[in-house]
Amino acid sequence: MIPYGKQDINQADIDAVVDVLTSERLTQGPVVPEFEKKTLTHCQSRFAIASNSATSALHIACLSLGITKGDIVWTSPISFVASANCALYCNADIDFVDIDPVTGNMSVSALALKLKKAKKNNALPSAIIPVHLAGQACDMEVIYLLAQEFGFKIIEDASHAIGGYYQDSPVGSCKFSDITVFSFHPVKIITSAEGGMALTNDKKLAKKMRSYRSHGIVNSEEDFKKETHGPWYYEQQSLGFNYRMTELQAALGVSQLNRLSTFVEKRHQLAQIYDQAFKAENLSSLHQSSDSVSSYHLYILLLPTSKSDLQRKLFEYLRAKEIFVQIHYIPIHLQPYYTKLGFNVGDFPNAEAYYKRAISLPLHPNLQPKEQTYIINNVIEFLYENT
Ligand SMILES: *Cc1c(COP(=O)(O)O)cnc(C)c1O
């Protein structure tokens, strides 16, 4: 079986985790701060809060921005459900902005239009969560300018995109956002098994997120609301969670971060081989903007047509050949939970058309040349016979 994505674990990763396992602290030790610091060095931003998943990082990001009942949050319908769920955790209303069909990312022209309408209706969003699909950054500068004009906050869901660049900055610099979130799930670019991180340049947001990560508790005297009782004293000031990352996970993360650029380079080489092979057959994948260097979390092939069940047939054909393709993503607004909230088929036509054409081919640092040739030949053979 050839998986669509997979972690790459070496001896250094194993040694790093075992070292922590036999050390004093399995959680709340020095390794999580080390992982945070090392990620900041790569990203050139100021504060990082590691968490037990990107989902929890998105949740504390929303909380730190004050998202609550009565607020509206917009994200992309072509993402994992977590990008939208985080707003619902805060009792806010969620809505979506349709995608740009060539990049699969949130369309900035659709966003501008929707903002103008929302302003008229007095229903502007408090925050927007652009998602860097497959590792390619959204048009962040435009989104940032719209944020200045319409007064919303920006959380980048960069779960796919650590190791990528936008203009001259690494994704995670937060140059055009309030907060950026990474995922370290094993299928992503680097892994800590489960894990996520929220980055920001805003000290107040960082403090809030750090507190929400651990029960809403604050530990430093300068932040206390009441007189300290003594050296054991801490205060719970809000309703937080236990979203902490363990030392074991952070050790794996630190070790993996050493190979971030190697992983991304390898992904680029493999993507280029796919590109060349498919270009010769007039097949396209997601368009790469000149503003962005993707981390290539996914290689998404776009089928020539959304008709005649082509995608499902190809999916079944490849899976029968042990090629574990995947579809990223079922539009969030079509999930039963979301249709129950009032969303319908036809609400975001570009996202729905894209969904019927997209198929993610295996892409990970250990994909072997033989395997890739086998995948390419099978895709092309199928399309010859079925189009
Ligand atoms: C994977 C993913 C998440 C959730 O990440 P976890 O670390 O598994 O919680 C959120 N958003 C996107 C776009 C993702 O791909």
Image (cartoon, rainbow, N blue to C red):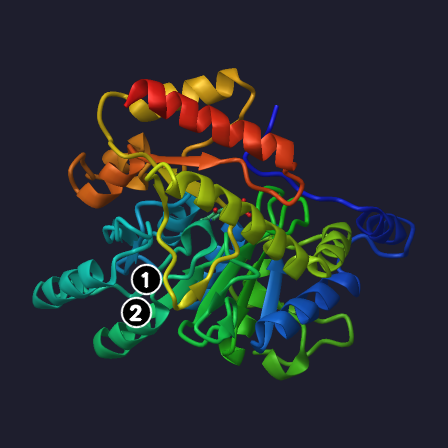
| Three-letter code for the amino acid on which mark 2 is drawn | Ile
Q: Are marks 2 and 1 in contact (CB under 8 Å)?
A: yes
Residue at the extreme front of the image, as rendered: 280
Inter-mark Cα distance, 2 to 1: 9 Å
Q: Where 291 sits versus 58, above or below?
A: below
Residue at the extreme top of the image, as rendered: 320
The yes-or-no answer for disc 2 within 8 Å of ligand 1 is no
Q: How far from the left and from the top, in percent, is residue 303?
A: 32, 34
The answer to whether residue 214 shows anywhere in this view is no
307 or 275, which is in the foreground? 275
Q: Where 357 sits versus 320, above or below?
A: below
Residue shown at the point (14%, 63%) measured from the top left: 113
Q: Which residue is mark 2?
A: 143
Q: Where 5 sits versus 271, above or below?
A: above
* Residue 128's disc number: 1
Question: Considering only order in the chain, which callout, 1 or 2, is on the residue closer to the N terminus?
Answer: 1
The answer to whether residue 76 shows anywhere in this view is yes
* Residue 322's disc number: none
Q: Quadrant of residue 280?
A: top left
Residue shown at the point (61%, 23%) measured from the top left: 1
Looking at the rendered structure, the secondary structure element under dot 1 is strand
Q: How far from the left and from the top, in percent, is residue 329?
A: 38, 38
